[in-house]
Structures are given as C-alpha cells and as structure tokens.
Image (cartoon, rainbow, N blue to C red):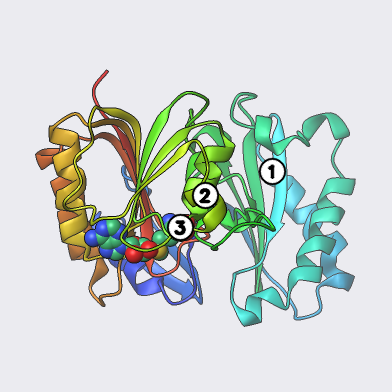
Amino acid sequence: MWTCRAGFESHLFEELAWAGASPRMLGEVLVESETRPSEPPVFARTGIRVLTSLPSEQNLDPMAGALAERILDTLPKGMLVLQSFTPDSPEGNRLADEADALLEAVRARLPADRLLEETWRAREAGATLVELCVAPGVVMMGEVPAREALSLSPGGRQRMRRGADSPSRAAMKLEEALVNLPFEPGRGEVCVDLGAAPGGWTQRLVARGARVIAVDPAKLMPELAHHPRVEHVQESAFAYTPEEPVDWLCCDMAWRPLEVAQLLAKWGRRDWATHLVANIKLPMKDKNPLLLRVRHILTEEGGWQGLTMRQLYHDRDEVTVTAHRGQ
Ligand SMILES: C[S@@+](CC[C@H](N)C(=O)[O-])C[C@H]1O[C@@H](n2cnc3c(N)ncnc32)[C@H](O)[C@@H]1O
C-alpha cells in the first residue's frame, strides 16, 4: 500500500499501472498494488507490505485493545520501529487521536527490547519499519525493511523545520532531499545554486560551510548577497558557465521542466558538477510522460547516475531529483 500527496492518486496509480504492478485505488491518498515495482514510484511518499487489514469503527478507542491483540499475531519478527499514521487528507487527519491510541495499545503489549526508539538508526540496525495506518473504516498494519523504506517518517511525512530567518519555504525541500542522501554539501565544497533567489537553498548550503555561486536574475536577500562565501551571478542560468567544475549543482529554477532537464544534462555531459539536487516543476496535467522524458534526458543525454526522482513531503506540484557523476 502506498501513500501520496492529496490530489496525486491518479499519477501514482498510473505509474504503478505502467510498471505492471496492478494498482487499485483504496481511497483518498491511498493506492495499493499487487507487486512492488523495481523503481520506487515517484509519487509515493511511502509504501508498506500489508500484513493485516481490519475493519474499524469511527471511534476506535474502545476497540484499540482488541485491534492491538490481532495486530500482534501478525507482527514481523526482529527489531521493529513502530509508527502509526493517518491518510494525509481532511477526513484522515481527523483520526489522528485514534492512530495514537492504537500505537500505544500495540506498544504496551510488546517487550521494550523489540522496539528501536531511535528511528534514525533503523537502517544501520537492520530494523523493520512497522506502520499502523488508521484510515476511515479500516486499520492496516504493514511492514517494510528500513533499508528499503522510501521514508522513515510515519506515512512518509518528513517534516523539516523552517528556520526563523529562512527567506522561503523552498529551503525545506532541499533539507528533505539531503536527509535521504548518504552525503551532503559541506565545509570547503563549492555549490552552484541555479534559480537561487531569494536564497533559501543558498542559505542552507552556506550554513553547512559550503561556498555558493547563486545564479538568478532576481535579488537575493541582503544578508546573503553580502555574505563572504556567496557570489551572486545575476544572469540567466542558461547563459551561465562555471569557471571550473564544482562539487554540487543545485537547481530550483521556476522554468519549463524539459528545458531545465536539458540544462542539467549539459552540466552532466561536461562534468561541471559531481552531485546533483534539482527540483523539477510540474504544473501540467500529464506528469508521468514528462517525467519519463526528464529521466531519459538526465541519464542518457546527461550521464547522471544513481538517479532518484521523488515527490517529497515538502514538494507541491513538483518533484525532486538527486544524482551523481561517475566513480
Ligand atoms: C522557486 S524560486 C527559487 C527559490 C530558492 N531556491 C529559494 O530557496 O529561495 C525560482 C527562481 O527561479 C528563478 N529563475 C527562473 N528562470 C531562471 C533562469 N533562466 N535563470 C536563473 N534563475 C531563474 C526565478 O527568478 C526564481 O527566483
């Protein structure tokens, strides 16, 4: 069972159908499929293999104990990270208290040494992520090995904090993308930030110790424009050429996706950057055919490797791509 952003069910369904995974709409923001495709679906926030599905009442409190007992019977073995979530829709979000109550009821029945509390360690510890999904009329319990999980956050809602001094909400997209990478831009590295204004991404890169070349015809917030590790190149990203190869190419340009993909492919072909994090805007109705073309341009024409393409929790009508060159 997969969860997605509200309104994106049909895109997720289409992807799963194209992958031959035999999808079925379960309800708002929930889609199930018979098999798991080899490529993680772009529009899925998270996915679990459902082990138990039980009907439930609107008021789950009196039933929580009985449901927990039945869930315990099918719980996977080994070290577990136990979480609950509700579908991210107005109707689903009203069940948040019920989801908490069920989580507590299951937790209380498990020996403490079965549960890994530090979720961030789940992958290295080889734990299994167990999610209790409390949806209107049904409770589902499912599992996914943490190493294969699309997200370690309940329901794939990886909330990043927006810094008080952040000039835009865009920075949270970069932070979320970096959470999922094994390495991140750091001290002494050089990042080019295409479409940088007003400076949310640039600010986060500078805070990590990197030097940033911010390319955008629009203005950066003054603190960044005068920062010793920021160079503002006030021109179009399509006209810009780096003086020497850089470590990170970051791109959040509000521009046509195929043209942005061609530009990123040019950077790849010319080995102008080692790592890529890019946000691709998708205002059009038919998103999947376009994403196939973007993927093709980046990998076949640009030579970018290890490509990931996901609609992250903080992405709206857009997806985030990560990739790297060579090695
Ligand atoms: C979503 S905003 C970027 C937000 C930024 N990442 C942040 O965190 O503050 C999109 C930016 O793309 C820029 N943009 C659009 N076309 C561009 C181009 N051809 N070259 C450079 N920047 C461009 C716009 O000026 C705008 O500032």
In front of the other: 183 or 311? 183
3D distance between C-alphas at marks 3 and 1: 51 Å
Residue drawn at the location 30% of the way across and 74% of the way down = 283
Residue for badge 2: 224
As helix, strand or loop, the secondary structure at mark 2 comes to helix
Residue drawn at the location 28% of the way across and 67% of the way down = 14
Answer yes or no: do the residues labelled 3 and 2 have beta carbons within 8 Å? yes
Residue 63 location, x and y as percent? 84, 69
Amino acid beneath label 3: Leu
Tell me if 13 is positioned left or right of 226 in this view.
left
Tell me if 291 is positioned left or right of 179 in this view.
left
Amino acid beneath label 2: Leu
The tag on residue 75 is 1
Of mark 2 and mark 1, the one earlier in the sequence is 1
Residue for badge 3: 220
Residue drawn at the location 19% of the way across and 29% of the way down = 271
Residue 96 location, x and y as percent? 75, 69
Q: Residue furthest left?
A: 301
For discs 2 and 1, the disc positioned in front in the rendered view = 2
